[in-house]
Amino acid sequence: MRACAGKGPWVDEALSRLAFTRIDRPSIPEIVHFPQRSSREDFYAVAYPLMFLSRRMDERMVELFKKGYVKGTVTTGVGNEATALGMALPFRPGRDVVSIMHRDLLGHLLLGATPHQLFCQYMANVESTTHGREGNAHHGDAARRRFPMISHLGKMPSLVVGGTWAARRQGEDALGLSIIGDGGSSTGEFHESLNVAAIHKVPVLFVIENNYYSFSTPIGAQYTCECLSDRAKGFNIVGRTIDGTDPWLVYSSVCDALDAIHADPGPQLLECVTLRLQGHAVYDNCEYVPDELMRKWRAQDPLPAARRKMREEGGFSEDSIAAIENGVEEMIQEALDSALRVARPDPARQNWSVFAPAAESELEPFRAPQVKNGEAVKKAQEYLLSLNPQAFLMGLDIGSYGSAFKTCKGLIDRFGPERVIDMPLCEPALMGFALGASQLGLKPIFEFQFADFSTETATQLGLNIGTWYFRTGCPAPILVRLPCGGGLTMGCFHSGEFEGLWSRFPGLKMLYPATAQETFEALVAGFYDPNPCLVFEHKLLYWSKSGPIDFDGDISKIWRARQYREGADLTIVAFGAMVYEALAAAQKSEKSLDVWNPFVLSPMPLAPIVESVRKTGRLLVVQECGATQGLGEMVISRIAREAFSALKAPPQLVAAPDMPIPFAPELECHYRPNSDKILAAVEAMF
């Protein structure tokens, strides 16, 4: 049978190497992918050699760990080979969007990885797929749509939904495969992902590998429904539970699901009741599994059963099967020997940057007369959507309502609901959706209603997206808009800034504009940068401040600190709305004040501000949030280290108290720094 486009070349080549051992028929059949199917006879001719390969590689990984060649957490798929094979075999490497789990080594092999690459990854040598930067199981090939998992279970399904949606939107017939365990299916983001996929009819097959234990926690402590597939009912999608130790049943069930998804796009949920014959990882002796259950599992081991099927239904003799097993052993040994010869990583030759390099580009100039900051947000998005067909807006209430602060008003009328997308309320899954879409060539612009709500996405945005380029080598161009700040009497859940929080995660770029010009430039620069960029938009400035926009199209000029007033006696560094309070204080002061906004919060360009402090000898930093919550102390520390000898007085910080933002206008006004407090601090420094 002819394999369709997108087949895994290594796997077919490996099976061809084993063909000479087949006595009874001319060759082992090639792997076929959706929409084709293998016959049952051909299936077992392929299934057992691959399951045997996976089992023996897992066993060799354990041996390598015990001998000290492999470090870290080594998890195996021993006992799970039938599920791993059956679910991955129909999918098309490099074409379908997948994310598989730590017990799916065979899935990696079927979807593009080679034994040499996997051995190198586990040994963390110089040819590991993550260049030694990531853990044993946290690997994939993002460029070929095999997204690497992270340990925070439940975070990966939303990436598959976003990536599959993006591929479909660009005219591809791509399908999605998202794997989760029984424990991971308890996480909120797993349910969020199912919901988003159902609403937007994204053709993703969600597979739950139910092996009875999440690490050591039994399923009785995880859920009370009869089957995990029952959870599909809540999203009005098809759910089914099958025996995951039967590779043919898994394979045919997945093919059936893909046929249905292809005919009527939308997600489906498949629970495979499988098992694991070893502990959670090599350090776990599995003592929490009752002996009787372990004996039952060993009797259900899918590998010996698949071997019998290869002989009985595939027509192979015992000698043929033994020869194939010997051939597999030889291939594994060759791959292991080659991996053992690979050098260890050299820190001097590593690319230590967490940021993808930006390409220089000249854009169309844009000019507008006096506009308010909120209008600058809208004009920037309109500019980006007009110039970039791959750009789309996503968020809550951004469609006909125009967003909470009307910064998207009318955009849906011009660009349509396919590019200005109202999403369900599930910020973590939406952030993962954006990451998945960014890997398939689209450019998401994600608006949070309030910066406070971004804290929902700490893992997805901070740990997964922020580290994506460092781990995968693939950029993650996502523009995140954060309406932030107080002054509008909205209380402590709608008035935060959180620039201090997000600055703690490497790999995120951050900009905090104050003027209409800066607002437009920040959104444009953040959009065209290949890294995830967060733009903080102070809500108080949306409709209270205005100015012209004169953008000449040169993005390279944007990434710099901004000076508003030149002075000789003291340097003020202010963020967001505090820029205007600092300027008001400078207007009142008898001293000559140099007023700056770093504008780029990460990576912060402090060199010109350091020169200012060397000139003035004094530094005052002003931030709206509490002293320990923002970036002020970091700015003081860095500048003091570089310009200590020039300081005539200790640097000072004007900040709010370290407490939640109060609600009543009188209390909020007292809480927030203002020009009088800044002026008093200036006078005290002299």
Image (cartoon, helix red, strand yellow):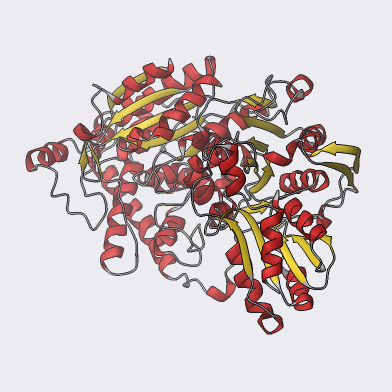
Above or below: residue 487 compared with residue 199: below
Q: Is residue 675 left or right of residue 376?
A: left
145 above or below 338? above
Q: Name the one closer to the observer, 246 or 570.
A: 570
Q: Is residue 563 visible?
A: no
Instruction: Report the number of numbered marks.
Output: 0
- Residue 150 location (% of width, % of height): 43, 48
The quadrant of the rendering that contains the C terminus is bottom right
Quick one: which residue is furthest to the bottom in this view? 645
Q: Nearer the viewer, residue 619 or 417?
A: 619
Left or right for 381, reference 226: right
Who's the residue at 83% across and 57% down the image?
Answer: 557
- Left or right? Give the position of 273 relative to 635: left
| Residue ID at (71%, 68%) | 683
Quarter of the figure with residue 607: bottom right
58 is higher (above) or lower (below) than 300? below
Q: Taking the image as drawn, is residue 153 in sight?
A: yes
Q: Nearer the viewer, residue 255 or 686?
A: 686
Q: Quadrant of residue 291?
A: top left
Closest to the observer, 41 or 678: 678
On the image, the x and y values in percent for residue 652 come to 63, 68
User: Along the horizontal axis of the image, is 35 left or right of 28?
Assistant: right
